[in-house]
Image: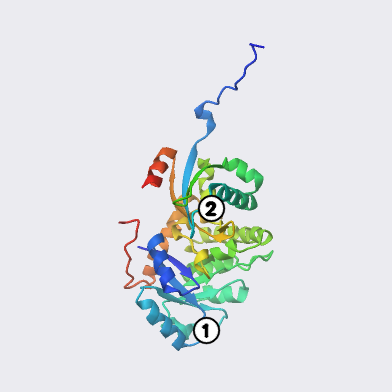
């Protein structure tokens, strides 16, 4: 099973180089305004075997229904109780991206975690938010996500750390994110299990059909 | 004067604590200098873990091979994962963008030198 990374830029040339270098596959995530935009990017990405994810910025059921069949994955941007509740209440949503902000009171709690576990919604963490955070914000982010991951462990929720890069400079090897999960309170074995288990988790949801693994430099 | 000890007796290896060597690569457009990489890495670690964290990590910059942009860090076994995570936070070296990648972790520097040579 390949390692999967989610990012916000669609330069297929750069992505192809890094896919080979880091031995991983990419999911291109965007906020699509209409079907045409999605179809265009899907055709472009099909040649390179990249998957497409639609990012929802509003708790809108109609939008979810519209893009569910067309995009490979659906992600809901969190940092808001309403959006978090919407994301974890439906099994049609694949990722809840960044459930918490730097706020003193985290926007994610045990009730939402229980729902996420029941509906098999993966909690996704954007590494670029940590990377670009100011030092005073970084400690708040770390505090909130240590709490979120404690809930994830309790309710056995799949956790994924993605680069969420807006430029190639923000890309990181997904395999290395196991150490980052360690920093957030996971022990080594569990962190590795989470990172390696994402593909399997998505395959079980029927989301990775026909996904080809590009021969990596490391395996040569 | 002859009775004064000139050298402190080394701590037995069993009490020194286990260490790990982390081989990392910085993907950058040009060869980087060891001194600047060391300064940048230590600055980042100080920002994230603080002085106490760095002291517990027993962080030691072993070397940096500029031609391949490969570096080796020594740390304690218990904090190896922390050190690997900390390296991911390196964004740029002397203003030039650099993408860190953990290549390997080993208990002996000799093994890593073999990997660098490949």
Q: Secondary structure at mark 2?
A: helix
Is residue B98 depicted above or below A86 in this figure? Answer: above
What residue is rendered at 60% in x and 21% in y?
A: B7
* Residue A112 image offset from top left, x and y in percent: 56, 69
Q: Is residue A44 visible?
A: yes
Q: Are marks 2 and 1 on the same chain?
A: no
Q: Quadrant of the C terminus of chain A?
A: bottom left
How crowded pointer 2 is (Cα within 10 Å; few <14, some 14-19, many 20+) is rated as many
* Residue B91 image offset from top left, x and y in percent: 56, 59
Residue tagged 2: B87
Q: Horizontally, is B32 left or right of B48 in the view? A: left
How crowded pointer 1 is (Cα within 10 Å; few <14, some 14-19, many 20+) is rated as few
Residue tagged 1: A61
Q: Quick one: A190 or A34, which is closer to the camera?
A: A34
Is residue A158 depicted above or below B15 in this figure? Answer: below
The disc at residue A26 is none
What residue is rendered at 69% in x and 59% in y?
A: A136
- Per the model, the C-alpha gap separating discs 2 and 1 is 40 Å
């Amino acid at each position: 099973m390949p390692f999967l990374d989610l990012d916000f830029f669609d330069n297929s040339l750069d992505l192809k180089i890094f896919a080979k270098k880091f031995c991983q596959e990419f999911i291109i995530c965007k906020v699509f305004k209409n079907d045409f935009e999605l179809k265009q990017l899907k055709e472009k990405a099909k040649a390179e075997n990249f998957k497409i994810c639609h990012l929802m910025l509003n708790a809108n059921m109609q939008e979810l229904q519209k893009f569910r069949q067309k995009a490979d994955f659906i992600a809901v941007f969190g940092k808001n109780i309403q959006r978090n509740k919407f994301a974890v209440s439906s099994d049609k949503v694949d990722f809840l991206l960044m459930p918490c902000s730097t706020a003193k009171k985290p926007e994610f709690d045990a009730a939402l975690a229980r729902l996420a576990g029941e509906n098999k919604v993966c909690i996704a963490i954007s590494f670029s938010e940590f990377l670009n955070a100011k030092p005073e914000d970084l400690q708040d982010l770390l505090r909130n996500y240590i709490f979120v991951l404690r809930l994830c462990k309790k309710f056995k929720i799949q956790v994924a750390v993605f680069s969420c890069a807006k430029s190639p400079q923000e890309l990181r090897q997904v395999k290395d994110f196991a150490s980052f999960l360690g920093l957030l309170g996971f022990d080594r074995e569990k962190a590795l299990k989470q990172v390696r288990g994402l593909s399997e988790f998505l395959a079980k949801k029927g989301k990775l059909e026909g996904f080809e693994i590009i021969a990596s430099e490391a395996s040569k | 004067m002859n009775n004064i000890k000139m050298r402190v007796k080394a701590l037995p290896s069993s009490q020194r604590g286990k260490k790990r060597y982390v081989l990392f690569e910085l993907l950058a457009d040009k060869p980087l200098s060891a001194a600047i990489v060391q300064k940048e890495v230590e600055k980042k670690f100080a920002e994230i873990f603080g002085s106490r964290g760095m002291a517990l990590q027993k962080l030691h910059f072993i070397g940096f091979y500029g031609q391949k942009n490969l570096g080796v860090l020594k740390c304690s076994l218990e904090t190896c994962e922390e050190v690997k995570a900390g390296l991911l936070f390196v964004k740029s070296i002397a203003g030039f963008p650099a993408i860190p990648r953990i290549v390997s972790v080993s208990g002996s520097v000799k093994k890593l030198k073999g990997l660098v040579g490949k």
